[in-house]
């Protein structure tokens, strides 16, 4: 068997299941193959593909490849692909939203163009994609996230309206983030956040329910981060649970290609 045939076929199988490009998979496969020199010889001297797939060391090798792919896709942040600025930083949520960002913003602006302040909880790099000029009354956009790299990237923007808190949800009372003289935010964003917290730190859900905001936008992805599979029903259940727990009313929805959510109020 030609090793190249095996690499291409395996990469194709993997890309049909996981959200990753063929070329990236091929690169990962080649990287791991280097650590299995005997396997290369074994494959080259075997006749049929099916025989190759049955080798114990081939199975171990593929397991390693898949594990690497899985863990690389689980991360929210990515090192940008070649060609990007050397130290720039990418966030998977922003990248996934990119093709739909115009649509997303239109739906957000239609409901909140007049807000004076925004609290973005677990904001990641979302503020980088916000057209601030389309919120003419916006004085303060308060961002809270534990992600240090996102914090540093956003600091570089030097946007006077952006108030950055690099910390954890619940580490300070919400009132500490409010602009002076206000008791409630006009809008709180919890985009692609609720289900993450639900799965990772359930006890913090209570804190999210207490965010002082006239309106909250909660969203979730429709597709899994790693596999090409729908998570819509699962994610919708979490959002609806959250809405019920907080006795919120749904006052609108947001729906773009790979993300959906609700505008909710007390
Ligand atoms: C899926 S990302 C969404 C980012 C952004 N809201 C967006 O949609 O583009 C979730 C973000 O929540 C942040 N996060 C998760 N749990 C957190 C916590 N307990 N405290 C602060 N930030 C948290 C992560 O650092 C990450 O940036």
Image: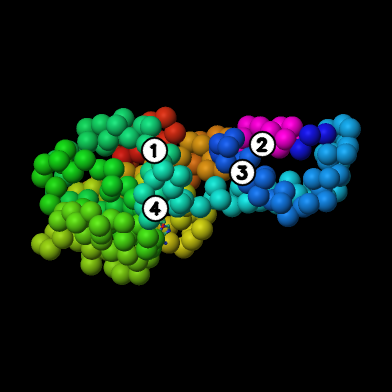
The nearer-to-camera label among 1 and 4 is: 4
Assign the magenta stretch its main secondary structure: helix
Residue 97 numbered tag: 1
User: On screen, 169 above or below 106?
Assistant: below
Pointer 2: what residue? 11
Sequence-earlier tag: 3 or 2: 2
Q: Earlier in the sequence, mark 1 or mark 3?
A: 3
Which percent across, then down, holds residue 92? 44, 46
Observer-nearest residue: 113 or 266?
Answer: 113
Quarter where residue 98 is shown: top left
Of tags 2 and 1, which is closer to the observer?
2
Image quadrant in which the N terminus is located: top right
In the picture of the structure, the residue carrying the numbered disc 4 is 86
The disc label shown at residue 27, or none:
3
When the figure is inspected, residue 87 is found, relative to residue 66, above or below; the finding is below
Q: Is residue 208 visible?
A: no
The mark that comes first in sequence, 2 or 1, is: 2
Of helix, strand and loop, which one carries label 1? Answer: helix
Q: Is mark 1 within 8 Å of ligand 1?
A: yes
* Image: magenta residue range: 4-18
């Amino acid at each position: 068997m030609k090793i190249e045939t095996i690499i291409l076929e395996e990469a194709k199988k993997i890309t049909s299941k996981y959200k990753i490009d063929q070329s990236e998979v091929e690169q990962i496969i080649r990287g791991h193959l280097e650590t299995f020199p005997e396997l290369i010889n074994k494959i080259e001297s075997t006749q049929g593909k099916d025989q190759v797939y049955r080798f114990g060391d081939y199975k171990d090798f593929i397991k390693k490849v898949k594990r690497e792919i899985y863990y690389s896709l689980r991360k929210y942040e990515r090192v940008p692909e070649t060609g990007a600025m050397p130290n720039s930083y990418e966030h998977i949520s922003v990248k996934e939203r990119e093709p739909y960002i115009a649509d997303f913003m239109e739906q957000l602006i239609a409901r909140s163009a007049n807000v004076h302040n925004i609290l973005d909880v677990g904001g990641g790099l979302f503020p980088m994609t916000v057209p601030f000029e389309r919120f003419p009354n916006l004085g303060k956009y308060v961002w809270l996230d534990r992600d240090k790299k996102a914090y540093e990237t956003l600091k570089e923007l030097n946007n006077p309206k952006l108030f950055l808190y690099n910390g954890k949800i619940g580490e300070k009372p919400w009132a500490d983030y409010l602009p002076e003289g206000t008791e409630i935010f006009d809008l709180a964003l919890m985009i692609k956040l609720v289900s993450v917290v639900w799965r990772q730190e359930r006890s913090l859900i209570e804190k999210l329910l207490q965010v002082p905001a006239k309106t909250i936008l909660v969203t979730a992805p429709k597709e899994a981060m790693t596999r090409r599979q729908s998570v819509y029903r699962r994610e919708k259940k979490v959002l609806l649970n959250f809405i019920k727990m907080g006795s919120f009313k749904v006052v609108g929805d947001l729906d773009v290609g790979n993300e959906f959510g609700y505008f909710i109020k007390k």
